[in-house]
Amino acid sequence: MKQSQYKIKTLKEAPKDADNVSTALLSRAGFIDKLAAGIYTFLPLGYRVLRKIENIIREEMDALGGQEILMPALHPKENWEKTGRWGSLDVIFKVKSRASQDYALGSTHEEIVAPLAKGFINSYRDLPLYLYQIQTKFRDEPRAKSGLLRTREFSMKDLYSFHTDENDLDRFYEKAQKAYDKIYKRVGIGKETFKTYAGGGSFSKYSHEYQTLTSAGEDEIYFCEKCQVAINREIIDEEKKCPECSAVKDKLAVYKAIEVGNIFKLGTKFSHPFELSYLDKNGQKQEVVMGCYGIGPSRVLGAVVEVRHDERGIIWPEEIAPFKIHLILLSREAKVKKLADKLYDDLIKEGAEVLYDDTDDTAGVKFANSDLIGLPYRVVVSDKTVEKGGVGLKKRRDSAEKIVKVKEIIKLMAK
């Protein structure tokens, strides 16, 4: 993509209401635009990153046997009344039609997926079943803040699993944990993200959150170095120790963190009110056992920036960067521009993702914008690099640039 044709508008200063690093950098670099508190537009660069995160999640959910669907965001009141959550869940946005019918804007989808599954499940032979979606959710957050980390409208992947019994749920639950570990590793925050014990509600002793360590986090977690797991504040106040090795609370390190995912064993909590059942091998009716597994792609995006940045800007992990290469032209000479244009065309032909800064901005502005946007590789074509027999190559994390021959650049960057 040629930058002269791409809608990128960078800012020298962060918006005054940007209250954390990710909001400041994503706004300055032209990835997001704030419409209102907790409501953001993803601009072209930001949307490319969001889609890449979503596709990583899709690949791992498909590998688990998940089947992708898309459920409505507008929910009839009656579904929520059946579970008793119409009156008890205070984050629901409620709307009324011109015919005075009440609806909820979906904050979660248990009330929709359970009756949906009735159309697929009759016998034990129909189980297990795994349905997931990536959908826009709405929550009436009382304190929408921290940019993408706490919003009123956000993207969410929610997978729902349906089982014959608790043992089958337990087996899948373990597989889901491994899939989540892969996702966080692929998006670039695997080292900072830990499985965190949380309350399990009425069905199981524990559920699990996935928490990314960062000073910008609103959550406080207790981390066990020995087990490499964490415990959220509510659980540690109850248990007073690590659930895996029994290390006492006072021996655990305390960190700030961002919740980037969660998994729950639901049991029959939602199958029961919707009469979601199956016939077992003996022809007896049994209630379906359920689990749910959530990840917020937009929140993950914000968490990545909180972890991957420096004083100059964002440092995108390669697998989710909006483009792999920032090709920068620094010359008014026709022959140098011709070389840069050809390099751009050749890289595109080889399948490389390239953002080509062919604008008339000064070198200082181009380099500052490149660092701010944070693509993994910077390739500079200038009078000086051509004189030295090639182009300048620098990784975003590195300080030094090296001269590489054009043919070598194509080989390196097309991998």
Image (tube, rainbow, N blue to C red):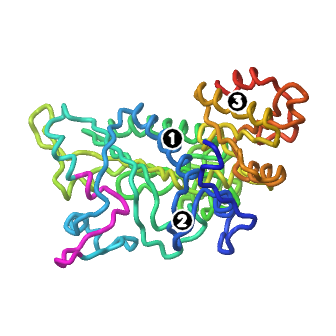
Helix, strand or loop under label 2: loop
Numbered label attached to residue 343: 3
**Height in image: 72 above or below 287?**
below
Pick whichever of labels 3 and 2 is earlier in the sequence. Answer: 2
- Of callouts 2 and 1, which one flags the residue occurring earlier in the amino acid sequence? 2
Residue that carries the numbered disc 2 in the rendered image:
150
**270 over 403 or under it: above or below:** below
Measuring 71% from the left and 41% from the top, which residue is drawn there?
A: 326
Local secondary structure at mark 3: helix
Q: Mark 1 points at which residue?
A: 180
Closer to us: 380 or 227 = 380
Q: Whole-Å distance between the Cαs marked 2 and 1?
A: 21 Å
Distance (Cα) linking label 3 and label 2: 42 Å
Residue 40: x %, y % from top left? 52, 64
* Residue 112 magenta-highlighted: yes
> In this rendering, does residue 142 appear at all?
yes
In front here: 240 or 77? 77
Q: Which of marks 3 and 1 is in front?
A: 3
Q: Position of residue 199 (x, y in %)?
A: 46, 57
Please report the bounds of the magenta region as a residue range.
97-114
